[in-house]
Structures are given as C-alpha cells and as structure tokens.
Amino acid sequence: MHSRRGGSYADANIEIISGPGAAGGRRRRKPAAGRGSIVAVPAPQPASRLQFQDILYEKRDGIATVTINRPQAYNAYTTTTLAEMSQAFQDASWDDAVGVLVLTGAGDHAFCTGGDVKEYASVYLHRPRRYWAYMGLFAQTLDLLRNLGKPAIARLNGIVAGGGNELNAGCDLAVAAEHVTIRQVGTRVGSVAAGGATQWLPLLIGDRRAREMLFTCEPITAQQALQWGLVNRVVPAAQLDAAVAELAQKLLEKFPECTRYTKQQVNFWKDLAWGLTIGHARDWLTLHMANWEPLEGMTAFVEKRPPDYAGLRRRAAEGKSSELPWGAPVRTCPACGARYLPEEFAFCGRCGARLEGADA
C-alpha cells in the first residue's frame, strides 16, 4: 500500500513537502520534533488496485464490502485469507469515504465455516509451533475488525460455523437469511473456540446459552439466533441485500465521530474479555496442537469419518495416555539405540527390533 504521494505505510521517517515548484510534492527526511510539517500517513487505495486471492473487496457509496471468496471450501479461511482481510480492514479504516463495512461470504451456502481444517491438518499438526504465529494473525484480524472506527455489519448468507461465528460476533450488527444456521465446532474437532466465542458469546446471548453452543456444538437456526440476540434481523434470502443496504444507510445518516466513539464505548466489555484471555488462548492452543485430540479430530474431519471420542476417554480411564498416541515417548531400542519411542510400541520404528518388555 502507498501513501497519497508515494510513500509506504512503513515510511514513518519521510514527510511530504508541498509548495510552488514541487509538482506532486517532494520528499525529505522528517525534521526534528516541534517543526511544522506534513507527514506521510497510510492512505486508502481504490479497491480495484488491491489484488487479493481469497477475498473480494469493493468500496461504493460509503460502504466497504469484504467477501470471503472460497465457496468451494464453504468460505473457510486460510492463513492467506486472514492476511488479506486484515489488509482490507485497515484500508477501510483509513478511508474517510467509507462509513460502514459489510463482511460476508461468496455464494448463498456459507457465510464462513472458520479455519480451513485441511490447512490445519497439513500444516499446523506437523509444525504445532507455527500455530502460534497463525493465532497472532487471527487475533490481529479480529482486532482490526473491532477497531475500524466504523460499524461493521455481518451479512450472514449461509452456514456460520466455528471461527465464522467469531467473525460474526466481532461485527457490530448482523443480518441473516432465513436458511442460516450457526454453530461452534471446537470440541468436535479437537480445539477450543477461544478466538472470540468463549469471550463474547456469554455477553451476546447469556452464559447458559453460550455454554450450550460451545459444549454441544449443535447448530441453532436463524430465528433462534434472533431470539437469543446473536443477530439483529432475519429476512428471506432474496431480501438479504436490501436489508443490509437499508441498515447500512441508516448508519451512514449519523455523525461519524459520534458513531465511532459509541462503538468504542459499547466494545468495552468485549475488549476487556478479549484482552484478558486471548494471549493465554494463543499459547494454550499452540501447545494443544501437539495433542492427540486435534490429531484425531482434524484427521477424522479430513477423512470424513466420526472422531474416536470414546477411544480417548477409554484410554484415560485405563490409566493410559490420552494426550499422546501410543503413550509417552519413554522407550529406547536396545538394538539401534533409538530413543523416545512410545511406551506402547512393541517394535522399534527405526530398525524393527523387538523392544524389551514387549508382549509376545
């Protein structure tokens, strides 16, 4: 991204000097503090100049629309998607011509179904430590969404699941089509919905309802979400765009600074809950990614089979490790010296020798 006169967002030590003979302005090093100057700041770009792979971005008539464009994956987001949404949110925040942001998904089947479990299984299960960086990006995306300085409307056009509901909860308002269903999925796939759902659902729908959604992972209908306070309006799918446009127009007909500070004030409890927990959640989820639960849950999802919940519970009841497949890495091969073999292995995975004490 570039400034109005050419600098980059990172060009903090450059100022733009305008005046006679300085066509378009000239650049020089920023003077010492206290001297008057015009400093280059991040400037919004025409939406057509921002090239994205996973999202669509449009700005028109005071409304910026961010569309997750992965309908083949039910609009699940990848690392790339999060990075692109962050860029779009920042652009919308800096653009004074934008008064409202609309977040939605491509097509009519899904708004967003959270993180792409196939990416989790292929990348983060193999390199759990990388999940810490991923969670940092996810937290940044939600921070930018909440701190736009402008209202954000979730246009719910289909299935809302997992992190998709955390994006919904991160918006200020939500309009849902009648066919929408909303659910959390964390405990079904070996994770915890601690990227917004555990923090904000109790504030939005009440403690007991939040616990029901988080523990059971059962979906609720659009009408139920309306009754619970998780969405503001429910309309037939054919009227969704008109309903979102009507709500956005009402927001645009209010004073922008008053709207910005109203959002800041209303966000207080959400920000408090988020700030107290997201760092801990980021660390715990990273450590947990090396656990058997996400390995089984996400692998089962990719393989399209039910996870073996009962097997893990049975192992724990029998006094065996339910955290590590095949037990703790405590055995050593007497033949080749390979160390840290799982305690339940009968043979060395390196040389094939029978391990001491293995059952015949």
Image (cartoon, rainbow, N blue to C red):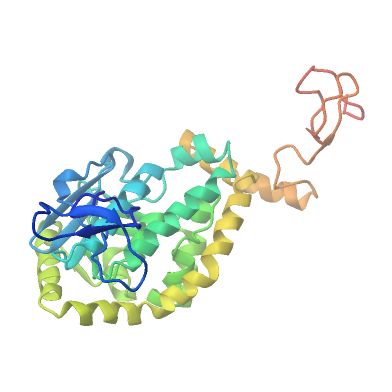
Q: Is residue 347 above or below residue 69?
A: above
252 displayed left or right of 164: left
Q: Residue at x 35, y 60 (%)?
A: 167
Q: Quadrant of the C terminus?
A: top right
Q: Is residue 119 above or below residue 248?
A: above
Instruction: Give the camera-side residue of 174 and 276.
Output: 276
265 displayed left or right of 17: right
Task: Indicate the position of residue 180 as horizontal and vertical percent values.
Answer: 26, 58
Task: Indicate the position of residue 78 as horizontal and vertical percent values.
Answer: 39, 43
Q: Residue at x 40, y 55 (%)?
A: 163
Q: Residue at x 10, y 51 (%)?
A: 23
10 displayed left or right of 281: left
Q: Is residue 36 above or below residue 215?
A: below
The quadrant where residue 153 appears: bottom left
The answer to whether residue 218 of the structure is visible from this angle is no
The answer to whether residue 47 of the structure is visible from this angle is yes
Task: Indicate the position of residue 310 as horizontal and vertical percent values.
Answer: 64, 48
The quadrant where residue 100 appears: bottom left
Q: Residue at x 14, y 71 (%)?
A: 247
Task: Indicate the position of residue 154 as horizontal and vertical percent values.
Answer: 25, 62
